[in-house]
Image (cartoon, helix red, strand yellow):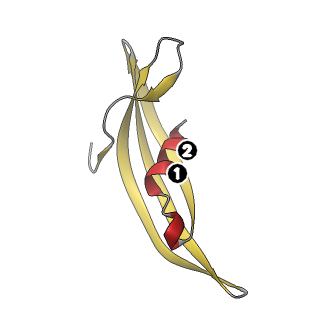
Amino acid sequence: MTYATEIEKHSFRRQGYTIVAPKIFGRYEEKDYLKVFVTTFGATYRLYGNRLEMTSGSIVPVAITYKKDGNGHERLGLVIKEGLF
């Protein structure tokens, strides 16, 4: 779930292929919400002939809040907050 959120947020198909590596540091639940604290390394690569090059990269700390729907599944419920938390 966290991986899917981060790949959606960091993926820029026109710029190349994006790979993310989220590291989950903690999580807690409160009523119908789940908050996950993550630091994500993301990098975008392009293929130039036979050569693969990294075109951009980032390391971003985020707090992601999900809301459970009626079936008990979790989906993005609130805005992703980047920066110190």
Instruction: Give the residue at x 45% y 18%.
Output: 68
Q: Is residue 17 left or right of residue 66?
A: right
Instruction: Give the residue at x 39% y 14%.
Output: 32
Q: Residue 57: percent from the left, percent from the top? A: 46, 69
Q: Residue 76: percent from the left, percent from the top? A: 42, 32
| Residue 79 figure quarter | top left
Q: Is residue 15 left or right of residue 32?
A: right
Q: The disc labelled 2 sits on which kind of residue?
A: Tyr
Label 2 environment density (alpha carbons within 10 Å; few <14, some 14–19, many ≥20): some
Q: Which mark is residue 80?
A: none
Q: Is residue 48 above or below residue 55?
A: below
Q: The disc labelled 1 sits on which kind of residue?
A: Ile
Label 1 environment density (alpha carbons within 10 Å; few <14, some 14–19, many ≥20): some
Query: Cα distance, mark 1 to mark 2?
Result: 6 Å
Instruction: Give the residue at x 70% y 88%.
Output: 49
Q: Residue 39: percent from the left, percent from the top? A: 43, 50
| Residue 52 figure quarter | bottom right
Q: Quadrant of the C terminus?
A: top left
Q: Is residue 68 above or below residue 39?
A: above
Residue hosting label 1? 7
| Residue 64 figure quarter | top left
Q: Is residue 11 above or below residue 24?
A: below
Q: Secondary structure at mark 1?
A: helix
Q: Quadrant of the N terminus?
A: top right
Residue hosting label 2? 3
Answer whether labels 1 and 2 touch (C-beta < 8 Å).
Answer: yes
Q: Residue 80: percent from the left, percent from the top? A: 33, 41
Comparing 8 with 34, the one in front is 8
Instruction: Give the residue at x 46% y 57%.
Output: 10
